Every structure is written in structure tokens, then in C-alpha cells.
Amino acid sequence: AALEGVVEYRNVTFAYPGAESPVLSNISFTARPGETVAIIGSTGAGKTSLLSLLPRLYDIAEGEVLLDGVPVSDLDRAEITKRVAMVPQRPYLFSGTIEHNLRFGKTEATDQELWDALQIAQGEDFVRAKKNGLNARIAQGGTNVSGGQRQRLCIARALVTRPKVYLFDDSFSALDVATDARLRAALKRTTADATVIIVAQRITTITDADQILVLDNGRIVDRGTHEELLETSPTYQEIVES
Ligand code: DUT
Ligand code: MG
């Protein structure tokens, strides 16, 4: 089983180039196909930094990030992006049509696949409402769509690539509670066999995760399910109550 999408971080310590102290220290966890691992923690805790190491946006000095048992430092980025889709915290759209934006990275997708992805991402209605549909134009940086629409288009873009691993960096924060719930229910069906790592602010987004990692100041201070952490983790309790 070479291409399943097993993610393993093994004792990872990471500092940004030129920085004196690490932003992540001794991070270890495994996320397997069919599992959702959630990462929660205050702003600046290192959540985005942690995700960015899998698609090799940065190389690490200590420890290992493994994809299906292979250190990502031994894989080229094109190989990684075939298996791993990351929806960034600040989703980026470029000047062009909605279709161009959705096909980015997967040019051979059919229109039906684009509409299916939009339906799951709860973006179908607003694209259908546009006069030109998939051919409607997006301005540079996506300034002519709302923040929530931008997030949904970037989620749809990730779905189109049919990855083994999904990384969602706070991808649901601009959505209202009802849309967030619908989107996650649809995603859950679609990503049932995939590995999902999700950074979230809203606790309801992650209560059903198989494992929650509580990140504080670059370290995993607690881990477990929602129920376990409610019992054992003061840091988690603080987050839940805030
Ligand atoms: N940092 C840098 N350089 C970068 C990005 C971040 O030095 O290019 C620092 C800022 C911060 C730490 O790394 O002290 C962790 O940042 P990160 O963005 O990983 O934190 P977060 O948990 O994702 O914060 P937020 O909830 O605000 O997204
Ligand atoms: Mg972040």
C-alpha cells in the first residue's frame, strides 16, 4: 500500500530560516486514511507552520515528516501535491474565470467534476447565480467575491484534485454556522477514505475528530478526543469556554 496517504510527524522541531528559536518543538503524531486529526491552539501557537511542513513549504532541521513512510524531503513538491491538497488560511484566487481557478493543478477535470466539487463545498448556488456560471470572472486576489465564497472556491479546488490527504487551515471560519455544518457533513462523506488534518477555531468543527492535538507555544501539550480532553486538559477547557 504505497499511496494511501499516511502522514507521520516524528519528533519534528522547526525554526523559520534566520530565526533564533524554533516555532515547533518535538511534534509527533500520525494521521491515517479515514481519520480526522484536528489541531487547536491560540493564535501564534504554530498551527499553520505545522501544516506547511507536509507540502514542504519549508524544510525541517530536526525530526521527520513522512508521507506513506517516505520522508517528504525525499519527494519533490509535484509528487507531494498529487497526494496532498492544502486549503490555506488565506485562500488565494487569481485573476481568471471560476473554472480556471477550480482547475488549477488538475487541468483534465470535467465540468461535472467541477460542479460536484462546488456542490460539496457549498459553492454551487452562488456560482449558478452568476450570469456566466463557471465562466464568471474572478478579480486578482478574489476581491470580487466574499471571504466565505473565496474559502468555498478554494475548498472546491482542493476537492477537484482528489487527494489522499486534505489539509484545512481554518477553512471554515468565514462561514456561518449553518453553512459550516452542511459543508462538513458533505465533506465527511467525500473524504471518508482520506486523511484529514484540520486546523479550527470553532470547537464545533472538531468535536467529532478522531484525535485533537492541543498546540501551545509550538508544543503539543495535550491530545485526545473531545470527551477525553474535556476531562484531562485545562488548556482545552479554556479554549472550549472562550
Ligand atoms: N512565523 C514566522 N514566519 C512565518 C510565519 C510565522 O516567524 O513566515 C512565526 C509567527 C508565530 C509562529 O511563527 O510566532 C507561529 O505562527 P503560525 O502562523 O504557525 O501560528 P498559527 O497557530 O497558525 O496562528 P493563527 O491562529 O493566528 O493562524
Ligand atoms: Mg494560522
Image (cartoon, grey):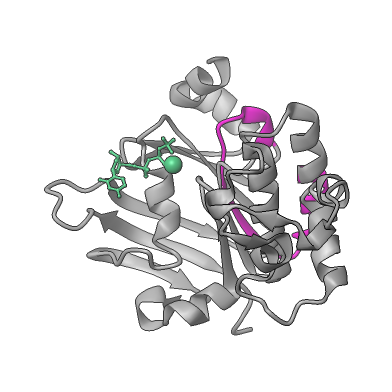
- Which image quadrant: the N terminus? bottom right
Q: Based on the displayed image, in which of its 4 quarters is residue 56 positioned?
A: bottom left
Q: At 69% across and 34% down in the image, what residue appears?
A: 175
Q: At 79% across and 35% down in the image, what residue appears?
A: 179
* Left or right, residue 18 beside residue 58: left
Expressed as whole percent of the image width and height from the top left, the position of residue 117 reads 79, 60
Q: Tell which quarter ligand 2 is in.
A: top left
**Is there any visible trace of residue 192 in the rendered image?**
no
Expressed as whole percent of the image width and height from the top left, the position of residue 55 reads 45, 67
**Is there any visible trace of residue 36 in the rendered image?**
yes
Expressed as whole percent of the image width and height from the top left, the position of residue 27 reads 36, 52
- In the depicted view, which residue is nearer to us: 130 or 19? 130
* Left or right, residue 78 beside residue 93: left
- Number of on-image labels: 0
Residue 70 position (above or below residue 152): below
Residue 196 painted magenta: yes
* Left or right, residue 14 beside residue 139: left
Residue 183 painted magenta: no
Q: Residue furthest top?
A: 241
Residue 112 position (above or below residue 212): below
* Start-end of magenta stretch: 184-207
Q: At 68% across and 70% down in the image, what residue appears?
A: 103
Expressed as whole percent of the image width and height from the top left, the position of residue 115 reads 85, 62
Q: At 44% across and 71% down in the image, what residue appears?
A: 66
- In the depicted view, which residue is nearer to us: 217 or 146? 146
